[in-house]
Image (spheres, helix red, strand yellow):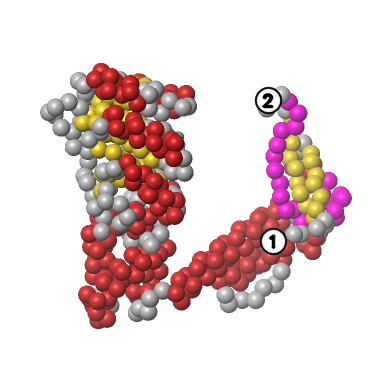
Amino acid sequence: MKLKTFQAKTMAEALEQVKRQLGKDAVILHTRAFTKGGVLGLGGRPMVEITAARSVSDLPVYARTAKMPRRSGSQCATAEGAASQMAPAATEPSLRREVASSALSAEMGALKSLVHELVRETRRARGPSLPDDLLDTYLRLAEAQVSEEIAEDLVSRVRDELGEAGLRDREAARRRLAGYIESMLPTAGPIQVSTKGGPTVIALVGATGVGKTTTIAKLAANFRLRENRKVGLITVDTYRIAAVEQLRTYAQIIDVPLEVVMTPTQLPASLERLSHCDVVLIDTAGRSQNDPVRMSELKAYLEQAKPHEVHLVLSSTSSQPVIDQVLERFSELDIDRVIFTKLDEAIGFGVILTSLQKVSAQLSYVTAGQDVPDDIEIGQASRVADLILGADLTGSVASA
Ligand SMILES: Nc1nc2c(ncn2[C@@H]2O[C@H](COP(=O)(O)OP(=O)(O)OP(=O)(O)O)[C@@H](O)[C@H]2O)c(=O)[nH]1
Ligand SMILES: [Mg+2]
């Protein structure tokens, strides 16, 4: 590969260098702007850099697609063809740069759909024998990260119930499927705050970084600002100063008291100081499911806190094997509820269904964004079922 890099103060100067040294057929592969010199990003000179080759044959293979004739017919060829049609017009360097980059994204797009198709074909071959419509539904469930076993069970139930004639009514089949999924999603409704006998104590536990503290802040803000409840916060996550500060900041903004607890034995006294509250939310440190020492420490905190409910926080961006491992390790803690976070970043919502089949706990909340207090909602079976069947987070249902 014969690529050369040129740097200059302006794009025009850099292009002039490219033309002078590589000739009029030069092909631009990449450009970037950067700062030269200066200290800590200050006082540097703005520069541009162009990476170019003398001709198309000098380009790396992935960037050559724009210039190469391709066979037509397949999805792959269509995307590449679009790029190759653009090539003849690209005589100016800036256009050539655009051609190279659109060729690259066309190639990536084609590769992605090829891989997607391959995965589908493999699943199709390994999946159950079903009428075409249902096979498509089965594949879509598998793509939504529903386990193959559950997906197979769901479509078999729909087939047995509706029969082949009934399946032609796609909307009826969809409704039936949604109904089955809903019935497999146990939900708990929101946290019930008791007005008698001291505060309702809720602890959130879960693996590192899944969103425990953010969810505590969302819950606290909703209880305090929307329901006018007296809220107290406790953090036992004292390993990192930043973790305490994170919750302290939220506590200050929401204007609720925060207790920082260093050892399990300090917990009863902290709870006593918050006994005037309606609800006390306990934030815990992220625990790696692979760290038995930290897990038993967490257990010691919970034994002292005696919470009314322990909510296990799971991220819907985690893969099923990771969630399975977390469920297994955290099961020693008597989990009452499950919260799924980061729905806005999930690839498929099937992990919620698959995971809830593996625990005796019910879904309490789901969160879909970083905004406190807005991005939290009560976990609803119908909502999750719709998401699994292709609705987006705004509630619109994707076309089949
Ligand atoms: N996109 C998205 N990000 C979220 C959501 N919930 C939390 N986050 C982000 O996830 C990151 C980690 O959130 P934390 O609340 O600190 O997670 P944690 O479980 O308390 O983390 P540790 O205390 O370190 O175990 C932060 O950047 C949050 O803003 C959500 O629903 N969607
Ligand atoms: Mg935290």
Identify the residue at image location x=74%, y=53%: 28
Q: Which residue is mark 2?
A: 40
Query: Magenta stretch: residue 78 in it?
Result: no
Q: Is residue 237 visible?
A: yes
Q: Position of residue 178 (x, y in %)?
A: 26, 62
Q: Disc 1 marks which residue?
A: 62
From the viewer's perspective, tell me whether residue 239 is left or right of residue 213.
right
Mark 1 or mark 2, which is nearer the start of the sequence? 2
Measured as percent of width and height from the top left, residue 196 is found at 12, 28
Relative horizontal placement of residue 140, taking residue 255 as reference (left or right):
right
Disc 2 CB within 8 Å of nearest ligand 1 atom: no
- 348 or 242, which is in the foreground? 242
Q: Amino acid at mark 2?
A: Leu
Q: Which residues are magenta?
A: 17-38
Q: Is residue 327 above or below residue 162?
A: above
Q: Quadrant of residue 6?
A: top right
Please report contact status of discs 2 and 1: CB closer than 8 Å, yes or no: no
Q: Is residue 347 visible?
A: no
Query: Which residue is nearer to you in this view: 348 or 101?
Result: 348
Q: Which mark is residue 203?
A: none
Q: Tag 1's secondary structure?
A: helix
User: Who's the residue at 44% across and 36% down the image?
Assistant: 293
Under mark 1, the amino acid is Tyr
Q: Total label count?
A: 2
